[in-house]
Amino acid sequence: MRKKIVAGNWKMNLTKEQALELTRELVDTLGDLTEHQRVMVCPPSIHLSSVAEVASESKALEVGGQNMHQAESGAYTGEISGAMLKSYGINSVLLGHSERRAYFQENNALLGEKVDAALAAGIEVIYCFGELLEERENETHFEVVSSQLKEALFHLEASQWKHIVLAYEPIWAIGTGRTASPEQAQEMHAHIRGVLADHYGQECADGVSILYGGSVKPDNAKEIFGKPDVDGGLIGGASLKKYDFMAIVAAM
Ligand code: PEP
C-alpha cells in the first residue's frame, strides 16, 4: 500500500538557530505515525547534518535534501553529491523543483541523470514537476506533465519505482496563494497515475505516492489530501511555521 507523505521544503530560508528550533519543535510535537504515513523536512544543504541530528531523536521525522549534482564527485564548485547526502544519513532528495528548473536551467534530460545518480547512491527521489499557468490556459497541461514524467523517468525499470515519489506542483500555484482546487489536483493525479499504468502496469502505478504541492495551507489540506489519488503534499511556505505544518500533517 502506498504511503501518505507530508514533506516540507524550506528552500533558502532559516538560519542555523531557526532551523534547529523548528526541528526541535517538530520532534517534540510529532508523536507516532502509522506505518502508512511519513513526514519529512528538506532544509538547505548547509543545515542537513545538524537538522538530521536533532531529527534522529524522533522515529517519525525524516530529513531530505533539496537538490544534488548528477556526478559522483569532482570539480563542481558549490555542489553536493548523492554520496555526501548518504554519508549524513540523508535518504531522500527533491529533484526537479520548479525553482531549479526556472533559475538553474534544469531540464528533463538533466533531471533524468540526477535521478540515476540519486538511485545509484541509494537515495529516494521526490521528483517535482508541473505546468506553467499559460500551459494550463492553453490546455497543454496534461501533455506537458506527461513529457516531464516520460523524459526524466521512463528509462527506469519498474522495480526502481519503489524509490520514486512524485510531487505534482502546478507552477501557477507555488508561493502564489492560488491553489489548484481539490478536483483539479485529483484530475491531474489520476492522469499521472494513468500515464504510469500505461507504461509500467497498474500495480506499479498504484504503488507510487503522488504528492500535491502549491499553496497548501491548514485550511485547504484536508480537502486536497482527501482525494483518492492525492497521497499527501509538498509544502513550501507553510512548512516554515510549526503550527501550520503540524496542522497539515494532521490533515494527512
Ligand atoms: C513548493 O515550493 O514546493 C511549494 C509547494 O511552495 P508553497 O507551498 O509555498 O506554494
Image: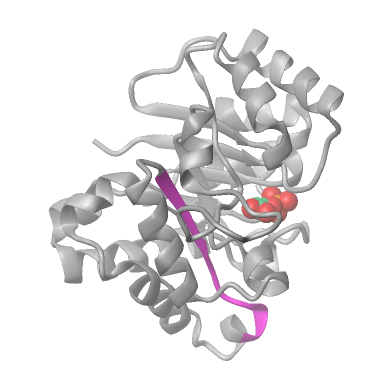
Asked if residue 31 lies left or right of residue 154, the reply is right
Q: Magenta residues?
A: 124-134
Residue visible at 44% across and 17% down in the picture: 33
Viewer-side residue, 63 vs 240: 63
Q: Position of residue 221 (x, y in %)?
A: 60, 41
Magenta-span inclusion, residue 128 = yes
> Where's the N terminus, which quadrant?
top left
Asked if residue 138 lies left or right of residue 245, the reply is left
Residue 211 visible in this rendered orientation of the protein: yes
Residue 215 visible in this rendered orientation of the protein: no
Q: Position of residue 175 (x, y in %)?
A: 76, 57
Residue visible at 73% across and 61% down in the picture: 178
**206 versus 39 height, above or below:** below
Viewer-side residue, 77 vs 196: 77
Residue visible at 68% across and 36% down in the picture: 218
Q: Position of residue 214 (x, y in %)?
A: 64, 56
Residue visible at 44% across and 35% down in the picture: 91
**41 versus 133 height, above or below:** above
